[in-house]
Amino acid sequence: MIESNMPLNAVSMGRSAEIKDVVGSEIMCKKLMEMGLSKGTVIKIMNNDIGHLVVKLGETRLVLGRSMAQKVMVREV
């Protein structure tokens, strides 16, 4: 089976995804890692409609802008 990665903002609300890669500048990668979004992390999409994306990481909810979410490559789990 081929594993397909997609941007975080393509995952439907209520689904979970594992972070496979972060593409972007070093500053962007560092900022996302500081938020707890690093390779191998499993997150749940709480809200993915118009505007910001809300993800759940453990008991924490994070709000990401669309452009930032576009740089996080994930695989649905």
Image: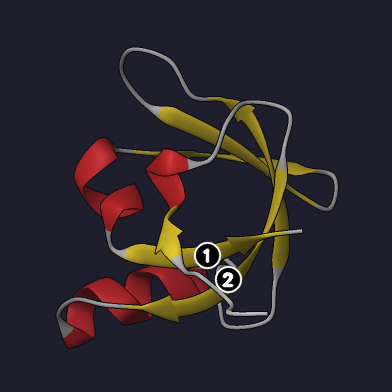
Q: Give the residue type that dot 1 points to.
A: Val
Q: Which residue is mark 2?
A: 19
Q: Nearer the viewer, residue 14 or 32?
A: 14
Q: Do the residues bearing badges 2 and 1 touch, measured as CB atoms within 8 Å? A: yes
In this view, 56 is above or below 48? below
Q: Nearer the viewer, residue 61 or 5?
A: 5
10 Å crowding of disc 2: few (<14), some (14-19), many (20+): many
Q: Secondary structure at mark 2?
A: strand
Q: CA distance from mark 2 to mark 1?
A: 4 Å
Q: Quadrant of residue 72?
A: bottom left
10 Å crowding of disc 1: few (<14), some (14-19), many (20+): many
**Residue 56, numbered label:** none
- Residue sitting at 33 percent across and 12 percent down? 50
In this view, 67 is above or below 53? below
Where residue 60 appears, as percent x and y from the top left, is: 74, 44
Where residue 34 appears, as percent x and y from the top left, is: 49, 73
Outermost residue toward the right in this view: 59
Q: Which residue is mark 1?
A: 74
